[in-house]
Image (spheres, rainbow, N blue to C red):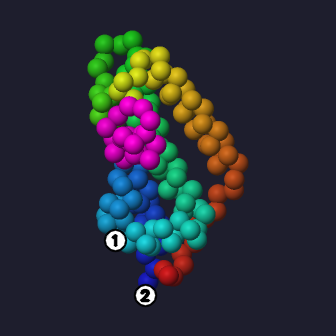
């Protein structure tokens, strides 16, 4: 049987996670099972890193949207509530309702402080990932 671990499949999974699809939905879109996805995560460091970075870009985009809507002085109205909802649904482990606070109840100052903290953590994680050598995707049979 031909492996489904191809550049196209990896790129499609990456794109799906970057726009906020759940792992379950991303797997369905790409024609693989969740078990296969998690097997790749376990066995392939490069794959895990790419999926983590795609998820990070999703979170970063929506945090920036919220941040700009709070700090922007222009007359442009931003839909930060859409980003809030996407983070609560698509990144519920970090932003979901089971967390100890609801970001809609934060003051602008508290929200800015939270964003600053998350940006710092994101920069640190990005530096760590940039220092690691990127390994190429290798085509291997699916297990």
60 left or right, relative to 132: left
The magenta stretch spans residue 99: yes
Determine if residue 65 is in view: no
Looking at the image, residue 128 lies above or below residue 75: below
11 left or right, relative to 124: left
Q: Considering the image in quadrants, where does the N terminus appear?
A: bottom left
Q: Residues within 10 Å of mark 2 (few under 14, many from 20)?
A: few
Looking at the image, residue 68 lies above or below residue 102: above
**Residue 90 in the image, given as x and y percentages of width and height:** 37, 47
| Marking on residue 92 | none
Q: Report the span colored magenta.
A: 84-102
Residue displayed at 32% across by 60% down: 25
Q: Which residue is mark 2?
A: 1
Looking at the image, residue 33 lies above or below residue 59: below
The number of callouts visible is 2
The magenta stretch spans residue 107: no
Q: Quadrant of residue 111?
A: top left
Q: Which residue is mark 1?
A: 31
**Residue 31 in the image, given as x and y percentages of width and height:** 34, 71
**Residue 89 in the image, given as x and y percentages of width and height:** 34, 45
Residue displayed at 64% across by 62% down: 135
């Amino acid at each position: 049987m031909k492996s489904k671990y191809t550049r196209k499949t990896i790129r499609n999974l990456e794109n799906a996670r970057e726009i906020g699809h759940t792992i379950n939905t991303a797997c369905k879109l790409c024609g693989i099972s969740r078990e296969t996805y998690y097997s790749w995560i376990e066995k392939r460091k490069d794959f895990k890193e790419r999926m983590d970075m795609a998820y990070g870009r999703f979170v970063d985009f929506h945090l920036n949207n919220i941040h700009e809507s709070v700090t922007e002085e222009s007359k442009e109205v931003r839909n930060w509530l859409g980003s809030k909802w996407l983070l609560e649904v698509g990144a519920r482990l970090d932003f979901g309702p089971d967390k100890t606070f609801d970001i809609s109840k934060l003051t602008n100052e508290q929200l800015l402080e939270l964003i600053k903290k998350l940006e710092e953590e994101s920069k640190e994680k990005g530096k760590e990932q940039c220092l690691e050598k990127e390994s190429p995707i290798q085509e291997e049979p699916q297990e």
